Amino acid sequence: MLVKRRRGWEMPERSATPESVYLDRRALLKAAGFGMAAAAVPFAAEEAAAQGAAADPTAGLYPARQNMRYRLDRAVTPEKDATSYNNFYEFGSHKGIAGAAQALKIRPWTIAFEGMVEKPVTIDFDDLVKKMPLEERLYRFRCVEAWSMAVPWTGFPMKAMVEFARPLASAKYVVFQTFMDPKVAPGQRQSWYPWPYTDGLTVAEATNELAFMATGLYGKPLPKQNGAPIRFVTPWKYGFKQVKSIVRVEFTDKRPVGYWEKLQSSEYGFWANVNPKVSHPRWSQATERVLGSDERVPTLLYNGYEEFVADLYKGMENERLFA
């Protein structure tokens, strides 16, 4: 008898959106945009289109096709919640930073690949995206503060970016750095924080199939408050590891010390893997609040992605994997 073991992150088939509805959603988005343009004064429509293209030349790449390998066991978080409840300390230590984040200028935007690579290179973000295989993935997201959401990221596998950078075989870690511009980011004027924001992964983690470079959200380019124009997403780790608005990627043979680890190493470590059995020093991680509701649900080991990533940490029992 064939016994099918359901993965921890996988939704029941009865809860999945039918493919026809999913595809119609995308058709509807495109049709709605066309309909609005047709209803407008032609000159105004052309002007708006030109302004939109100038603001984001990649807008036409969205929505991307969903990769059905990465699905959810819960409803997708409403867009208004995921885009209005954000951690981005560059713009403030509270959650309502969405308005302030709009001051960030994301064109032009370049990303430098440096360190232990065959040849350092700096590339325009728009050019990088065009070289990558964009897709949509539905992922859980778990914050170390014990709240969670479930969102549709658009982007490309981090492994593709690593291959583009061509690191040396001796490189063991990847370090990501966010932008530094105190003129538009008031939080960066607070000198007691170790700006610019950095954090990193092992090369093995960065090339795991789950590791993802996000450039979009909810079928559109990534909002500024969520880390535009590009951030990384590792759904088995707490959110503070996942650097936003990336301008620099460095390959090194030395384990990096990230922003929060520099601030408080007794509370935030390098690995930051989700584990309900290891509490934060100031609160339990056994359950999480689902964003957009008061519901609390059990937290899963590796945020439900154990089958994808557990092998990365075998033989490392003495490491502080979950802090």
Image (spheres, rainbow, N blue to C red):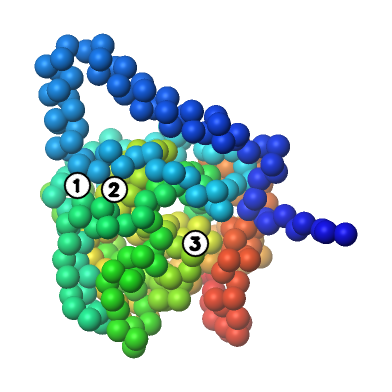
Location of mark 1 (residue): 106
Q: Amino acid at mark 3?
A: Leu
Location of mark 3 (residue): 210
Q: Is residue 273 above or below residue 222?
A: below
Mark 1 or 3 closer to N-term?
A: 1
Tell whether 5 sits left or right of 182.
right
Q: Quadrant of residue 94?
A: top left
Label 2 near label 1: C-beta < 8 Å? yes
Residue drawn 26% across and 53% down?
130
- Please tell me how crowded label 1 is: few (under 14), some (14-19), or many (20+) other residues with Cα within 10 Å: some
From the image, state whether disc 3 or disc 2 is nearer to you: 3
Tell whether 31 sits left or right of 250.
right
Question: What x and y, as percent, mark residue 201?
Answer: 41, 72
Q: Is residue 53 above or below residue 5?
A: above
Residue drawn 88% across and 59% down?
1
Tell whether 239 sits left or right of 297.
left
